[in-house]
């Protein structure tokens, strides 16, 4: 059942909360059962075959799917310029009309600019004049959200 839970238990909002609790409960029960002694010879019934260990079953790959999904979301958010803060570095590629900007580590060779100012609710790059050292700007508009990043030299 734990193998089925690993594969099928993650596919809903509440399941993301309930599934880890169920798996922990199964683990506690497994530890308790592991402490039991061997079956007594001549006892009624035949002990069931334990089967393959849980993590050697194909259904255990269900554990990998939520980890990959959460990691991909976290990586995407961490590199999105909308989440850049003053002091972060960005990589800027593409053209002036279609820029490809993402947040990177300041020690990265691709880090071309340092965010020296961030202004929400505007795309007016003239507002970067209030940030000395501005050499470029990045504007973004998503639905009703507007963003202006004032960029300076990285170094």
Image: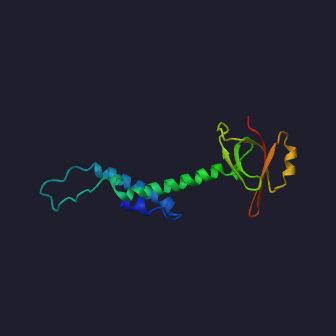
Identify the colour scheme used.
Answer: rainbow
Pick the residue in front: 109 or 35: 109
Q: Is residue 35 visible?
A: yes
Q: Left or right: where does residue 55 sit relative to residue 120?
A: left
- Outermost residue, top direction? 155
Position in image of residue 110 (x %, y %): 66, 41
Position in image of residue 80 (x %, y %): 67, 52
Q: Is residue 2 visible?
A: no
Quadrant of res 63:
bottom left
Q: Left or right: where does residue 93 sit relative to residue 55?
A: right
Query: Could you tell me which quadrant the C terminus lies in?
Result: top right
Tell me which residue sits at (49%, 53%) in the image.
67
- Outermost residue, left direction? 42
Q: How many marks?
A: 0
Pick the residue in front: 153 or 147: 153
Quadrant of res 105:
top right
Q: Left or right: where does residue 153 sit relative to residue 43?
A: right
Tell me which residue sits at (19%, 53%) in the image.
39
Look at the picture and state if 149 lies above or below 3: above
Pick the residue in front: 22 or 104: 104
Tell me which residue sits at (29%, 55%) in the image.
52
Query: Could you tell me which quadrant the N terminus lies in?
Result: bottom left
Look at the picture and state if 143 lies above or below 20: below
Q: Left or right: where does residue 114 sit relative to residue 125?
A: left
Position in image of residue 98 (x %, y %): 73, 56
Pick the residue in front: 36 or 115: 115
């Amino acid at each position: 059942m734990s193998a089925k839970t690993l594969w099928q238990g993650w596919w809903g909002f509440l399941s993301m909360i309930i599934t880890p609790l169920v798996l922990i409960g199964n683990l506690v029960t497994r530890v308790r059962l592991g402490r039991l002694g061997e079956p007594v010879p001549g006892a009624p019934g035949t002990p069931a075959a334990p089967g393959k260990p849980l993590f050697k079953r194909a259904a255990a790959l269900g554990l990998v799917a939520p980890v990959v999904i959460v990691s991909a979301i976290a990586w995407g958010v961490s590199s999105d310029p909308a989440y850049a803060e003053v002091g972060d570095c960005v990589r800027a590629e593409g053209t002036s009309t279609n820029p490809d900007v993402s947040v990177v580590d300041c020690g990265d060779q691709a880090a071309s600019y340092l965010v020296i100012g961030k202004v929400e609710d505007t795309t007016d790059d003239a507002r970067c004049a209030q940030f000395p050292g501005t050499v470029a700007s990045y504007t973004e508009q998503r639905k009703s959200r507007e963003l202006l990043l004032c960029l300076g030299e990285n170094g």
